[in-house]
Image (cartoon, helix red, strand yellow):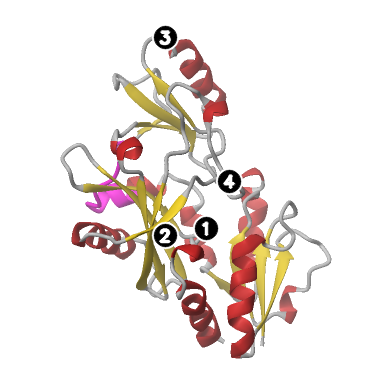
């Protein structure tokens, strides 16, 4: 059995998580090859399954990426889910379904009244073109950033102080079931703008294991239940933060190419490998 772990040209070997999955799949009789998603020489029909992993340049080629995914013989997560999830306007769908989310303004005419806020494009990965701004002295730079993204569309959210004090919490799911959780340290320095991001290989900050609360698990379940036409997804990452009232709110629902933070749980790679093998 052969599986393609789709990646992009800057990381042709798929990165450290691909290596962990390949090692976990080998004892199950599954060969996993990292393959650059837009490599014209790739023979996707030779694989029993394509698993989207580190295709992080799709944001520059979204239409091409989705056309490629639609044409694959078999892909996880499914192509319709990828189409819905690669534009962060899916957050409007989730909010409309009653999922508590961070308030979001879409292509606002001017800066919001929030004292501190984050501006980012609706199609983005690894916090690219994302910046944290404070009203007042930084208004001109923040407006310029917003204008540079307009029509993409741009999205503006209040910066929640819990990101600094406790970090974001990511809940990882495998085959529709909770797998493990991780805490993500802040990656946007206050007042630093786009150049102020502190990231690693995959656009993330420091990662540490976490134990989710019942409220966090309930929020993740609500978010996943609201995904249109999806059940039993191979992988999902639900990113959340504590809101001003002390309850968790959804920041992002990552169903396309998220880091799975496999190093946060020693059993995680084997868990995902078993789910992949089961699909074969």
Provide the residue span drawn in magenta: 93-103
Do the CB atoms of the residues marked 2 and 1 lie less than 8 Å apart? Answer: yes
Magenta residue check for 96:
yes
Q: Is residue 64 left or right of residue 176?
A: right
Report the Cα–Cα distance between label 2 and label 3: 36 Å
Disc on the earlier residue, 2 or 1: 2
Where does label 3 land, which residue? 137
Where does label 1 land, which residue? 259
Q: Residue at x 24, y 49 (%)?
A: 248
Where does label 4 land, which residue? 200
Report the Cα–Cα distance between label 2 and label 1: 8 Å
Disc sitting over residue 67 in the figure: none
| Among the 4 quarters of the image, the one containing residue 231 | bottom left
Magenta residue check for 150:
no
Q: Helix, strand, or loop for circle 4? A: loop
Q: Judge the density around disc 1: few (<14), some (14-19), many (≥20) Cα neighbours within 10 Å.
A: some
| Among the 4 quarters of the image, the one containing residue 129 | top right
Report the Cα–Cα distance between label 1 and label 3: 35 Å
Residue 158 image point, x, y percent? 32, 30
Q: Residue at x 43, y 64 (%)?
A: 236
Q: Quadrant of the N terminus?
A: bottom right
Residue 200 image point, x, y percent? 58, 46
Disc on the earlier residue, 1 or 3: 3
Disc on the earlier residue, 4 or 3: 3
Disc on the earlier residue, 4 or 2: 4
The dominant secondary structure in magenta is loop
Q: Residue at x 71, y 56 (%)?
A: 11
| Among the 4 quarters of the image, the one containing residue 21 | bottom right
């Amino acid at each position: 059995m052969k599986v393609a772990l789709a990646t992009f040209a800057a990381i042709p070997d798929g990165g450290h998580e691909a290596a962990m999955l390949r090692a976990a799949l080998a004892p199950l009789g599954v060969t996993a090859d990292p393959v650059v998603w837009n490599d014209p020489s790739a023979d996707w029909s030779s694989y029993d399954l394509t698993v989207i992993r580190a295709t992080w340049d799709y944001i520059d080629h979204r239409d091409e990426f989705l056309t490629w995914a639609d044409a694959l013989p078999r892909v996880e997560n499914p192509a319709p889910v990828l189409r819905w999830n690669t534009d962060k306007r899916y957050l409007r769908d989730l909010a409309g379904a009653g999922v508590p989310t961070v308030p979001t303004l879409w292509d606002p005419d001017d800066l919001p009244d929030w004292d501190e806020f984050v501006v980012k494009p609706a199609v983005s990965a690894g916090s690219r073109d994302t910046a944290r701004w404070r009203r007042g002295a930084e208004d001109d730079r923040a407006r310029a950033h917003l204008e540079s993204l307009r029509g993409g569309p741009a999205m503006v959210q209040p910066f929640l102080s819990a990101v600094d004090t406790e970090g974001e919490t990511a809940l990882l799911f495998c085959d529709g079931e909770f797998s493990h959780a991780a805490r993500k340290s802040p990656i946007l320095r206050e007042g630093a703008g786009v150049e102020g991001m502190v990231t690693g290989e995959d656009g993330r900050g420091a990662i540490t294991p976490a134990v989710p609360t019942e409220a966090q698990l309930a929020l993740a379940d609500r978010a996943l239940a609201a995904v249109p036409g999806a059940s039993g997804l191979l992988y999902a990452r639900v990113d959340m933060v504590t809101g001003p009232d002390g309850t968790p709110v959804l920041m992002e629902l990552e169903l396309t190419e998220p880091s799975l933070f496999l190093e946060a749980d020693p059993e995680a790679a084997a868990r995902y490998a078993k789910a992949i093998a089961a699909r074969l």
